[in-house]
Image (cartoon, grey):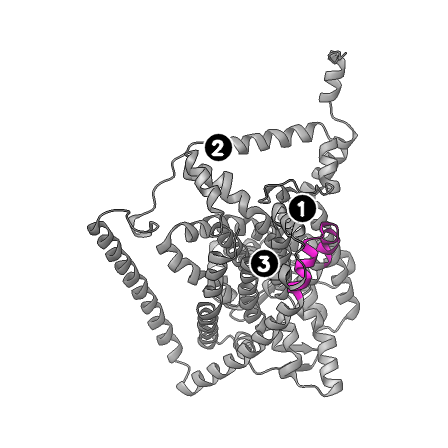
Amino acid sequence: MFLPASAPARRTRRLPNQWDLAALLFVLGALAAFGHGAAGTLAPIDAPEATRLTLAAADLPYYALRTVMRMLAAMAASLLFTFAFATLAAKSRRAGAVLVPLLDILQSVPILGFLSFTIAFFMGLFPGQVLGLELAAIFAIFTSQAWNMAFAMYQSLTTLPQDLVEATRAYRLTAWQRFWRLEVPFAMPGLVWNMVLSMSGGWFFVVASEAITLGDATWRLPGIGSYVALALEQRDLGAIGLAVLAMGLVILAYDQLLFRPLVAWSGKFRFETTAGANAPDPWVLALLRRTRVLRRAAEALGTALTAIGSLRLRLPALPMGLRLGLPRQGRSRIAMGRAGDLAFGLAVAALAGLAFWRLADYVAAAVSWGELGEVLLLALFTLLRVAAMIGLASIVWLPVGAWLGRRPALTRLAQPVIQFLAAFPANLLFPPFVVGIVHFGLSPEIWLSPLMVLGTQWYILFNVIAASAALPGDLAEAAGTLRLSGWLWWRRVMWPAILPAYVTGAITASGGAWNAAIVAEVAAWGDTKLVASGLGAYIAQATEAGDFPRIALGVAVMVVFVVFINRLLWRPLAAFAARRATF
């Protein structure tokens, strides 16, 4: 016999408990810390403490806070960009024909290329204020995070199971409802994993993003990246060790507090028709469920967001020039659609031609044809390094990622380790690489190459882990029932499951390796400087000299090479994966 709870008992369940108090203290502490960090962004540039930097260990927590705030702001901007950019590229054939190559171009533009041409704009928004420098640094970090996330969501939206799409049509869901109830949930597991990797990718370039140069003036924003750069200049191994320790602690903190709960939450969106094994909740989610007030607040927020996603909103129709596909009936309408395609293509070609002409006119004033040939040869050297490193990374991480993805317990243990390795800036390995190459008389042309793939190989591993973990449970059960094993299991089950995600990771890793060439092909430790022949070294030296025509030439050649490789190799492979290797 069940008796209704008494009124005092019901009131007790509504009152905060000790877990609410612990969570409240944590939230208040985080808000106070972020408020303290934000105060530093509002100071004038010429204030004594605005850009002052020391190697004192006591200042390192504040520097870590400022760096994390920049990276979280860049991550928020990257999410907004991903939802808008990837959705338009996937839903509009004409827009996709422009946006996907544009994404190739954007991911291949080096971070120094973005910084060189955008600093003046951001400083003009807030003249004389640190906030202008902060926005320039956030934008630079954004460029190291957004492209990977956009590629991941685009790949998910183009590989939606057709039966689910037909179900949304049968239930007459609007485009707004379909986006929030099908497309975003389906993309969420892969997107969350790529958010983890993008956060680590931001760490890889944090040294470059926190050093702002405009003309003859250079500012170093308080942050771990600037701390590392100063420690390298002064050859202070103790300070470098402290920076690595601080970076590891910060990565562990946001892995536990942010990404581990997100990965666990995204697991409920896996596409499968049989019940999978439930992993234990991370301690943060377990703590939240033990609270009373915060749990009810979180449930109310979730209910409100679900209601918003369920609204029968009619999104504005795309402009005629961007609509997907051709009209269904009528030769005249089909002819009009083809004419629209032709007009759209001509307009895009005209804009591209105008941009090319303006760039060529700007570069030709300072660069000869002979130097252009030398730059193309340097690009070929970098291409060989990128191809060798991506091939080696694929051979190593494809089987490892597939194996880890099928073992959730090991994945949870490996996740923070992989994040730390992916975030490890190449600059911190300059001392052992430079000393080793000089001591053993090795060739920089070969032995600086591993620095190029140091941060980008993890795009392959993370994407393969996410795809392997998302393998439908019913498919895995069927493979077990049929006793598939060895090469047959790989060819019939695992390879079709991970191929789309691998291609996405390889595209991003390839573009990232070209980007990282700027850091990898020039390594310095104190007065010793090693340079490998390549396009990255050319751009790095031009940036150091403030030679904008040669920066523009190097970036343009890098963009052409990356886009050409993507069009010739990766995009056909991605199309094959979307057509043949999806469930």
Q: Is residue 493 above or below residue 232?
A: above
- In the image, 548 versus 308, the foreground residue is 308
Mark 3: amino acid: Arg
Start-end of magenta stretch: 397-417
Q: Horizontal placement of 168 versus 427: left or right? A: left
**In this figure, which residue is indicated by the disc labeled 1?**
258
Identify which residue, 261 or 548, lies in the foreground: 261
Helix, strand or loop under label 1: helix
Q: Nearer the viewer, mark 1 or mark 3?
A: 3
Q: Is residue 20 magenta?
A: no
Q: Is residue 387 something one can see in this rendering?
A: yes
- On residue 492, which mark appears? 3
Residue type at the position of mark 1: Leu
> Majority secondary structure of the magenta segment?
helix
Residue 118: percent from left, percent from top: 48, 62
Residue 71 in sight in this render: no
Residue type of the residue flagged with mark 2: Ser
Residue of label 2: 310
> Would you say the residues marked 1 and 3 are in contact, meaning their CB atoms lie under 8 Å apart?
no
Q: Secondary structure at mark 2?
A: loop
